[in-house]
Image (cartoon, rainbow, N blue to C red):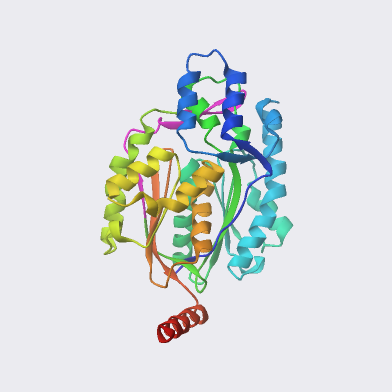
Amino acid sequence: MPTLCKPAVSVPEYVVTMEDTLEFAEKVHGGKPQLQLALRLIQNTGVRKRHIVQPIEEALRHPGFEERNRIYESESKKRCPEVIEQALANAALNTDDIDAIIYVSCTGFLMPSLTAWLINTMGFRYDTRQIPIAQLGCAAGGAAINRAQEFCAAHPESNVLIVACELCSLCYQPGDDAVGSLLSDGLFGDAVAAAVVRGSGGVGVALERNSSYLIPDTEEWISYAVRDTGFHFQLDRRVPGTMEPLAPVLRELAANHGWDVRNLGFYIIHAGGPRILDDLAKFLDVDRENFRYSWATLTEYGNIASAVVFDALRRLFDDDLLRTGATGVIAGFGPGITAEMAVGSWTADPAETMDRVQLDALTSSIQ
C-alpha cells in the first residue's frame, strides 16, 4: 500500500506580521471604500505572520508580469532542491529511486515545467515521469497526494516525489482594490514543500482510498483573471460557506471505507481561512482542536495554498503521538470549487513498531 512519508517544508526569510499587513494596506489602499471591510476581514483571519520571498517594500512594487515570472523561476530553482533533498531523506530514498515527480504550483508559470530542470540538475533518472499540475490552486496538494497514490497502484513498487512551490506574494496587485483581492493580500504566504509517496515500505500515512468532488456551478467563485499585470485573484463571498455541502462528501468517503469521520485519529485539512476550519469541524461534528495542525499552519504561515496539507502533515509527524493503525483524513479545497480527499492509516516500519511495543511493555511493568 502506498505510504505518504514525512514532508519537508521551507518558508522564506522575510516575515510579514499582521501589524505590517494592516499598516501597508492603509498606506497603499487608503481612502478606498472597501478598505475598512477588508481590514476587518484580514484581522479575523487569525494569521499572525507570513513569510515572503522578497522584502515587503519590494513585494509591494509591481515590476511587471515578465519580471514577476522571472523572480518566480529564480526563487523556485533556489529553494526547491534543499526541500526535495530533505523529503527524500525523510523517505530513506535517493533520486534514483523516484519514478515520477508531481510538481504543483499556481503562482508562476514555466514551460517546460520545473520538473525538467529538477531531473537535469538533481540527478533524477531521465525516464522519470513528469506530472505538473498548475490550475487546481489550493486543492493541488490533495490532488497530488491522490494522483501519487493512483500512480503507485498502477505501477507497483514505484515511488513518487511531490513538490509544491507556492510564491503567493508574487501575485500581489497594488492596483486591485476588490475586497477579495485585499483579503488575499493579508491571508496568503509563500512556502515550498515536498514529500514522497513510497510504493512499499516507509513510515507515515498508508493511503487507502481517495475521492474528488466538484461543487456544481461554482467555477467562478475562486479564480484568476489573467491580465497584462499578471494573475489577479478573485474570491467570491460565498466561498466560506462551501464546507456545508462538502462535509457530507467527506463523511461518505470515510463511511465507504468503513470508518466514522467523527472518530478518526488525525485530520489534515486545508487551512483556507478560519471559517473553513470552523465550519468543517461543525458540519462533521468534530472538535475544532482536532484540526490543530491546520490551525497552526494558518496562524504561523498563513494560507500557503497547495503546501498547506504538507505543512500540517509535517506538524503531525513532529508531534510523534500516533500509533500504528491510527486512522485519518487528508483534504484539500480549491478552485472549482474542488475537493481532493484521502483516507489512510498510520504505518511504521517493523523496527519502530517493535521498539514502541517493547517501550509500552516496559512502562506497564514499571507501573
From what the image shows, is residue 239 above or below residue 304? above
Quadrant in which the C terminus is drawn? bottom left
Q: How many marks?
A: 0
From what the image shows, is residue 246 above or below residue 35? below
Q: Which of 12 and 197 is in front in this view?
A: 12
Q: Where is residue 233 in the image (x, y as percent from the top left)?
A: 51, 29
The main secondary structure of the magenta stretch is: strand
Q: Position of residue 260 (x, y in %)?
A: 27, 60
The reply, left or right, for residue 161 in relation to residue 70 is left
Q: Where is residue 53 in the image (x, y as percent from the top left)?
A: 68, 40
Q: Where is residue 43 in the image (x, y as percent from the top left)?
A: 48, 31
Magenta residues? 211-234
Q: Does the magenta stretch include residue 293?
A: no
Quadrant in which the N terminus is drawn? bottom left
Residue at x 44%, y 52% (from the top left corner) = 292
The reply, left or right, for residue 249 in relation to residue 228 is left
The residue furthest bottom is 365
Q: Does the magenta stretch include residue 226?
A: yes
**Residue 130 in view (yes/no):** no
From what the image shows, is residue 347 above or below residue 244? below
The residue furthest front is 367
Residue at x 51%, y 31% (from the top left corner) = 184
From what the image shows, is residue 234 above or below residue 312? above
Q: Which of 181 and 222 is in front in this view?
A: 181
Q: Which of 15 and 204 is in front in this view?
A: 15
**Residue 360 in view (yes/no):** yes
